[in-house]
Structures are given as structure tokens and as C-alpha cells.
């Protein structure tokens, strides 16, 4: 693929690399849109959704803990990042009231509120979703 050309059909955005440094552009857990969000919460038996907004300090402060928890729980949980500024309709749905929000079978499970550390997030997920303990 040459610069300025669209990616070939079937190429995923995660395959994109920086033209200057060759590093992956979409490493980690990229933000999702409404379509990907819906697909992921229906497809995965245990997704965790990190809802964030740039203007919300507590949510912004929790982002590193969510990312670290996602790395620790990677085999048992699918972490999805949702920018509530860009996806207001999704963020306003019932069941999404903070970060992280856990879904199982497309429905939210018991939540918690307030900023949490990585360890607290991991314990919370494992307590509510035993299959994530592996």
C-alpha cells in the first residue's frame, strides 16, 4: 500500500503503521464506535467497557488502571474503550454508568463506582465473572 491510498479490502486498522517510524498506530485497545461496540458485547461472553470523556477527571484518571487490568485479565476479558464524547448515544444506553462497565450476554452486570486501582478492578471483575479468573 502506498501513502495516500486506502487500505486494501479486508485490511484491519490495527495493521496500520506509522509512515515515519514503522510503529503500529493502533496498538493496545483502540476506541470503538457504536457498531464495533454492539458487535463486541454480543460476541464476547465477558467484555469490560471503559467509558471515558476527556472532560471527566475521575474517568481520565482511571484509564491507566483499566488498561493495566485489561492486560492482566486479557485471556478472560475483552476490554473495549468507548469515548463518550464521540459515541454519546451508546454511552447513554441503560447499563453504562461509569468505568469500567461489565457485560455478559449483552447485559450489564453489577457495577461499582468511583476511581479504582488496577488491583481493585481485577478483583471486581473476578468476583463478578468467575470465568475471568483464568
Image: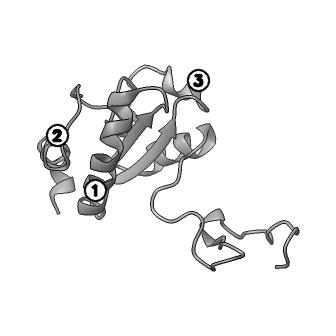
Residue in the image at 85% along x and 78% along y: 2
Where does label 3 land, which residue? 89
Residue displayed at 23% across by 32% down = 115
Residue 59 position (above or below residue 8)? above
Give the Cα separation between the discs numbered 2 and 1: 18 Å
Mark 2: secondary structure = helix
Name the residue beneath numbered marker 2: 128
Figure check: 94 above or below 120: above
Question: How far across and how far down the image is residue 73, in percent?
Answer: 25, 59
Residue 65, position as x, y percentages in the image: 27, 48
Residue 14: give x, y in percent of width and height.
59, 66
Which of pointers 2 and 1 indicates the residue nearer the eye?
1
User: How many numbered marks are there?
Assistant: 3
**Residue located at (35% from left, 44% from top):** 63
| Precedes in sequence: disc 1 or disc 3 | 1
Q: Check whether the beta carbons of the residues at disc 2 and disc 1 lie within 8 A of each other.
A: no
| Dot label at residue 68 | 1
Disc 1 or disc 3, which is closer to the eye? 1
In this rendering, is residue 66 above or below 85? below
* 47 sits to left or right of 84: left
User: Label 3 to label 2, Cα distance in Å?
Assistant: 26 Å
Please tell me which of labels 2 and 1 falls first in the chain.
1
Q: Do the numbered discs 1 and 3 sit on residues whose CB atoms are within 8 Å?
A: no
Amino acid at each position: 500500500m502506498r501513502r495516500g491510498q486506502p487500505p486494501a479490502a479486508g485490511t484491519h486498522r490495527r495493521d496500520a503503521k506509522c509512515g515515519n517510524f514503522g510503529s503500529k498506530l493502533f496498538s493496545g485497545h483502540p476506541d470503538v464506535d457504536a457498531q464495533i461496540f454492539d458487535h463486541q458485547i454480543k460476541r464476547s461472553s465477558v467484555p469490560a467497557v471503559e467509558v471515558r470523556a476527556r472532560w471527566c477527571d475521575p474517568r481520565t484518571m482511571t484509564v491507566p488502571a483499566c488498561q493495566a487490568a485489561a492486560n492482566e485479565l486479557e485471556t478472560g476479558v475483552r476490554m473495549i474503550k468507548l469515548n463518550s464524547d464521540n459515541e454519546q448515544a451508546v454511552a447513554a444506553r441503560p447499563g453504562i454508568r461509569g468505568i469500567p462497565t461489565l457485560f455478559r450476554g449483552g447485559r450489564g452486570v453489577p457495577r461499582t463506582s468511583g476511581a479504582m486501582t488496577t488491583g481493585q478492578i481485577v478483583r471486581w471483575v473476578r468476583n463478578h465473572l468467575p470465568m475471568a479468573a483464568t
